[in-house]
Image: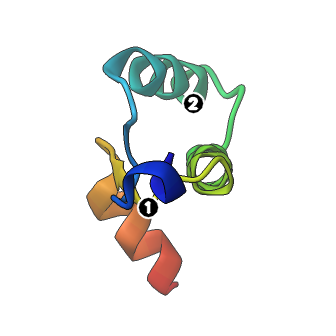
């Protein structure tokens, strides 16, 4: 799409998946940092230039560590 329209591709990480991951983390099924980085990496690999997510602040901190 980026090539066709010559515009950046933006994605929105939906609240349902955010809630699902948070719930799995609370139950001890997932490591939040690892799960979020995996999700964001998948979105980037799929072609996202811009990612809108509830984890923006945490992700920025995790990527600096």
Image spot of residue 26 (x, y percent): 52, 25
Comparing labels 1 and 2, the label whose residue is closer to the camera: 1
Could you say which is closer to the camera, residue 27 or residue 55? Answer: 55
Image spot of residue 3 (x, y percent): 52, 58
Could you say which is closer to the camera, residue 30 or residue 8? Answer: 8
**Which labelled disc corresponds to residue 49?**
1
Could you say which is closer to the camera, residue 62 or residue 40? Answer: 40
Residue at horizontal 37%, vertical 71%? 60
Number of residues whose C-alpha sits closer than 10 Å to that of mark 2, classed few (under 14), some (14–19) or many (20 or more): some
Query: Do tag 1 and tag 2 residues touch (Cβ < 8 Å)?
Result: no
- Asked if residue 65 lies left or right of residue 37, the reply is left
Residue at horizontal 38%, vertical 51%? 5
Image spot of residue 16 (x, y percent): 40, 14
Could you say which is closer to the camera, residue 41 or residue 45? Answer: 45
**Which labelled disc corresponds to residue 25?**
2
Number of residues whose C-alpha sits closer than 10 Å to that of mark 1, classed few (under 14), some (14–19) or many (20 or more): some
Real-space Cα separation, disc 1 to disc 2, in angstroms: 27 Å
Helix or strand or loop: what does disc 1 sit on?
loop
Helix or strand or loop: what does disc 2 sit on?
helix
Q: Is residue 25 above or below residue 54?
A: above
- Asked if residue 47 lies left or right of residue 14, the reply is right
Residue at horizontal 37%, vertical 24%? 14
Count of numbered badges drawn on the protein = 2
Residue 35's image quarter? top right
Q: Earlier in the sequence, mark 1 or mark 2?
A: 2
Residue at horizontal 72%, vertical 26%? 29
Residue 54's image quarter? top left
């Amino acid at each position: 799409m980026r090539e066709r329209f010559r515009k950046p591709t933006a994605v929105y990480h939906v609240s349902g998946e955010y809630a699902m991951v948070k719930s799995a983390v609370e139950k001890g099924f997932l490591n939040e940092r690892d799960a979020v980085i995996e999700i964001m990496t998948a979105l980037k690999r799929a072609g996202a230039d811009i990612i809108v997510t509830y984890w923006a602040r945490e992700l920025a901190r995790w990527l600096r560590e």
